[in-house]
Amino acid sequence: MYIYEKGTVKYNFSNTKQILEIFQLLCAGKDEPYEELCKLFQEETQQGKDTGAYNKLLQSAMTSIKETFAGRVMENLKSSRSALLIPSPSEDSEQSEFELLTWLIIK
């Protein structure tokens, strides 16, 4: 996903190609991190101890994924006789529904 700092989603999980193109444009040919940006991240997060703002963005992303998926299920139910209603997960398993593969902070 591509999500703005305020939590607004620019590209959701179905826009994989666009997101990978952005990653490629920003990272192609770079084999070293941008030191100044790494220092900025370290300052913002107190050396990684306070990632609350980024955790909120991750939570916003997960909520968006769930809402988009639920909307697609509902549309499928309306348009197809062979559609299946997927049971809602229990609260205990909600956090394990997603796996974060990579992330890129763009400043």
Image (cartoon, helix red, strand yellow):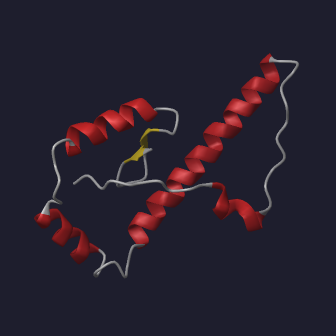
The residue lying toward the viewer, choosing from 5 and 25, is 25
Q: Position of residue 46 (x, y in %)?
A: 28, 81
**Position of 38 compared to 11: left or right?**
left
State the residue in front, 44 or 24: 24
Q: Residue furthest right?
A: 81
Residue 65 against residue 105 in the figure, above or below: above
Residue found 57% across the figure and 53% down from its top: 62
Whether 60 is drawn above or below 36: the answer is above
Q: Does 69 sit left or right of 92 as displayed?
A: left
Foreground residue, 97 or 107? Answer: 97
Q: Is residue 30 above or below residue 43?
A: above
Q: Residue at x 26, y 38 (%)?
A: 24
Instruction: Tell me residue 44's x, y (percent).
Output: 26, 73
Measured as percent of width and height from the top left, residue 23 is found at 30, 42
Quadrant location of the N terminus? top left
- The image shows a total of numbered marks equal to 0
Find residue 103 and report its horizontal and vertical position in percent. Answer: 38, 55
The quarter holding residue 27 reads: top left
Which image quadrant is residue 70 in?
A: top right
Identify the residue at horizontal 78%, vertical 17% (top origin). 79
Up/down of 93 relative to 70, above or below: below
Q: Residue at image x 20%, y 67%?
A: 38
- Residue furthest left as drawn: 36
Q: Quadrant of the C terminus?
A: bottom left
